[in-house]
Image: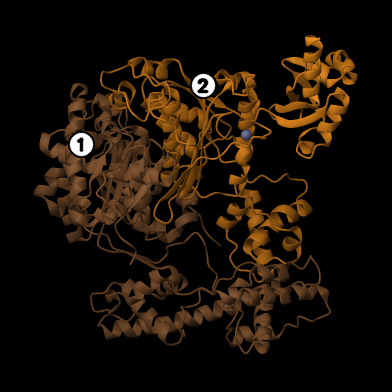
Chain colours: A brown, B orange
Amino acid sequence: MEVRNNNNNKYDRQLRIWGDQGQLALEQANTCLLNCGPTGSEALKNLVLGGIGSCTIVDDSKVEARDLGNNFFVDWESIGLSKAKTVCNFLQELNDTVKAKFLEESPETIINVNPDFFSQFTLVIATQMKEQSLLMLDAICRKQGVMLLIARSFGLTGLIRISLKEHCVIESKPDNVIHDLRLQKPWAELKRFSDEFDTEIDDSVIHKHIPFAILLIKACEDWRKTHGDSLPSTSKEKAEFKNLLSSKRRGVDEDNYKEAILSAYRVWSSPTISSELQKILNDSAAEVNMNSPDFWVMVAALKEFIANEGEGDLPLDGTIPDMTSTTEYYVTLQKIYQEKAESHVSSMEARVREILKRIGKDPQSISKSAIKLFCKNSRNVRVYRYPSLEDEYNSCIGGELQRLLGLEENRESGNGAQVMVGGEAAEKGSPSHAMDINATFYLLLRGVDHFAAAYNRYPGIFADEQEDDAMKLKSIATTLLSKMSGGSRAVLSDDLINEICRYGASEIHTVASVIGGIASQEAIKLLTRQFTPIPGVLMYNGIDSTTTILQLTTCI
Amino acid sequence: MEVPGRWQDIDYLLLREGAMVGPGFEPCPELREALHNDLRILVIGAGGLGCELLKDLALSGFGNIDVIDMDTIDVSNLNRQFLFRMNDIGKSKAVVAAEKVMQRVKGVKVVPHYGRIEEKDDEFYRQFQIIALGLDSLEARSYINSVVCSFLEYNADGSPDITTIIPMVDGGTEGFKGHARVIIPGVTPCFYCTLGLFPPQVTYPLCTLAETPRSPAHCIEYVHLIQWGQERSGDSFDADNPEHMKWIFDEAFKRAQQFNIPGVTYSLTQGVVKNIIPAIASTNAIISAACALEALKIATMCCRSMDNYMMYMGTQGVYTHTLSHEKDAGCLVCSPGVPFEVDISISLQKFMELLMDDPRLKDKLSKPSISYQKRNLYMQAPPVLEEMTRPNLNAHLFELMDKSSGKLNVNDKKLTGVLRVSVSFRGQGDVVVDMDTAGGG
Ligand SMILES: [Zn+2]
């Protein structure tokens, strides 16, 4: 019987999502937050509540009146005091199991003076930082193998970007679970069990409790006998196959037959190895050596498994959906699938141990439970590789930007006509409208940093210079766009440029709370290695409440 | 209670023109003052979404916030309901949340209401200019929706009377997923218009539970729904009573063993019996903030509104879909009325029978009372009114409605709000022509 302590109760609602292993990963993580304005404070708040191991807040500013208007983790009494210390104390109140620390220092100084500081962390969350510092930070984090999460709120817009070399996910937990039942090629034990049933049986109670999996296995056998050993392939044949099942149904109360007809597609479209998984199998990292991470060792073993005892298939995950049946039939069927899955785990384990030995590592260095988890999820394992910030800034996001702004066709058609981007040209509310605005916001946030580099302040912060700033920003952003879109003659609409200047680099609490919230979701996904992270730059648009991802990594 | 520069970030939005603002936006300092002093907003629910909403609204400049919640604080709230601590367990959520927000955000007034939403009368809800919903049940949403939509009145030309509209923002979360939406009754779809957006609840056939259980959940539900009543009929089951929950778990565990079904745990037992929805701080923060931002837009018009529903999915990357749902023109709750075409000779009595027999309304009515433009046509109670209006039953509806098509309000004990019925008369056109002819003659 389980013993549940207070922490399990406290975390009950989240343990139901990421489980004890996920929670353990969070509790072992050391995070660092750079700048504790509302965006950073909100991101960290959500992680502290969830029970992150430790957090260190780095910020050298003092609490000002302005902070009282947008940050919940400062108060009246703390005006003039260290913001890092104030936020740290208030966050600590939320969860005493978290080690909350602070450092009254500017992130830029640490980046410049003490880059080794970052090596102690699992994850660094950099908020409200400019391009130049981020470039240096990214290089440091990559070198030290620290995950980097960038979050920024700017008026009614904001962005999130993950940067790391490689992120391997075993438990990607897709929303749609695909059951791998192998009804068209039952193995010996499953075939034997299926043979125990007689679909012509008189006993109506038994007849309506034969599990649909068995009905389909038998229907396949019958079909093969009369169709030269092949399965239904044309739509006519498929309909005929379903009709055969229907004809055996004795009444509308026979739910098992209804389920069999609804599940008949499983016979001709059994789950295959996806192209994403195939890419992982073909990746050069699957040629393992001494330095290969466990994940890739298991991928190497998976490749061998598929080629040998898997006979072209993945290890069985061993789960079956619920189906109308008696308890006894169902439990027996469940066992047959589980035992087959177990035997696949054993084969995989032997291969993993063999490979470990071959590459000169301890053959026991990967636990059986880890191998089991890998097998259970092998269909959905994923790998993400993010380009460096330097690559993003230099060029590699250009194609994506052109795609979202609809500039590709323009250039290809070669008519050289000017295209207005970021305006209200596209129909409001349409997906292309959101893409157009959000991609333009990406460009403008880049532009804002260039503006700041040139003028040592953000555009629009002084009311009397708002118009002038808009013109300067337009010229900067136009140059940037032209560089990133290979010289396309796109014209930026004034609406969004004015809007950005209107914001005056403000950090609106609700926007910060959205951005901080998304950042903490991503942090949890990265740290628990569950679910899948944002594969690029996510732009948030609070005007229309939309988001757009500028794709940086196709999962390999 | 103000220091200069405190609201600088929000002020950029409130004091400057923009190209993407709401209708009639006039940037001026009075906007923030009105937001702080005059406007009243109600937050329904002080749980995962409610705590966030209170913080977000207070830091958006809203100065007069009410919050209502019937729950007390439980240990399982602490992973996300950040206004509560271990030593608050057992206290009223609304009371503690209001205290904490006022303590931290100086100058904001938060009035707590510890109780059920059904206990408050119409006058309570009418006090507010905006209502923000942080609820976790469809029933509570439907209730508030009916109340707020019952305030809505339509002008003669069929357009909603804007002075009767109370806009709502609504959020909901489950794990890494959620939704945020804006409901402007009469303008954008209400809950009832889009009931289909909510997934149906999982239920199991009783015969499966009793005879052929196959999953741990089947065993748990059997003990919860059947065995409890058979063996402990004297006790009414309380999911918050640890002894009750333990009993369910023990019995379900035994039943599962007997059927060879693995996987019954205490945690799963709680999950199934209480229909627990997984919840995390980050998703609540995202959804609440999206809602609060919409509330700020509605209050100040500093930016155009979201149109009108955002779905958020955070499990596979981040995917959002913002879509403009359509109003249901025949919505029972928010539309100008359920259309009825009747003969001009119909009596009120016959018309009421028609209502009761109509498949659209059948389950919603038991003893309807009917009024027309604030005039009672027939009232079921009190007896005095019933007697006074009884003679109308035999009168022609056409006469009672001043010889024109129009809207009737139907009240019934079975309804939470008012039901509008839009009546048009067959052959009415001929009548008008006849009259014209007569006049011309
Ligand atoms: Zn409606």
Label 2 or label 1, whichever lies nearer to me, is 1
Which chain is home to disc 1? A
Tell me how far mark 2 sits from mark 1, CA to CA: 40 Å
Where is residue A117? Give x, y as percent: 16, 52
Residue A172: image tag:
none
Query: Does A308 sit left or right of B222 as displayed?
Result: left
Where is residue A332? Give x, y as percent: 65, 77
Label 2, on which residue?
B129
- Position above or below: A257 against B365: below
Query: Where does the N terminus of chain A fall, quadrant-wise?
Result: bottom right
Return the residue nearer the eye: A128 or B346: B346
- Position above or below: B96 against A202: above
Crowd class of label 1 (few under 14; some 14 to 19; many from 20; radius 10 Å): many
Using the rendered image, report if marks 2 and 1 lie on a common chain.
no
Q: Which amino acid type corresponds to the residue marked 1 in the rendered image?
A: Lys
Where is residue A405? Give x, y as percent: 31, 48
Residue sitting at x 54%, y 40%:
B325
Give the quarter of the image for residue A199: bottom right
Furthest residue toward front: B441
Residue sitting at x 57%, y 77%:
A337
Query: Does B51 sit left or right of B423 as displayed?
Result: left
Q: Which element carries disc 2, helix, strand or loop?
A: loop
Q: Which amino acid type corresponds to the residue marked 2 in the rendered image?
A: Gln
Residue B226 visible in image: yes
**Some atom of ligand 1 lies within 8 Å of the CB belonging to the residue at label 1:** no
Residue A474: image tag:
1
Crowd class of label 2 (few under 14; some 14 to 19; many from 20; radius 10 Å): some
Ligand 1 appears in which quadrant?
A: top right
Q: Is disc 2 in contact with disc 1, using a CB cutoff of under 8 Å? A: no
Return the residue nearer the eye: A404 or A453: A404
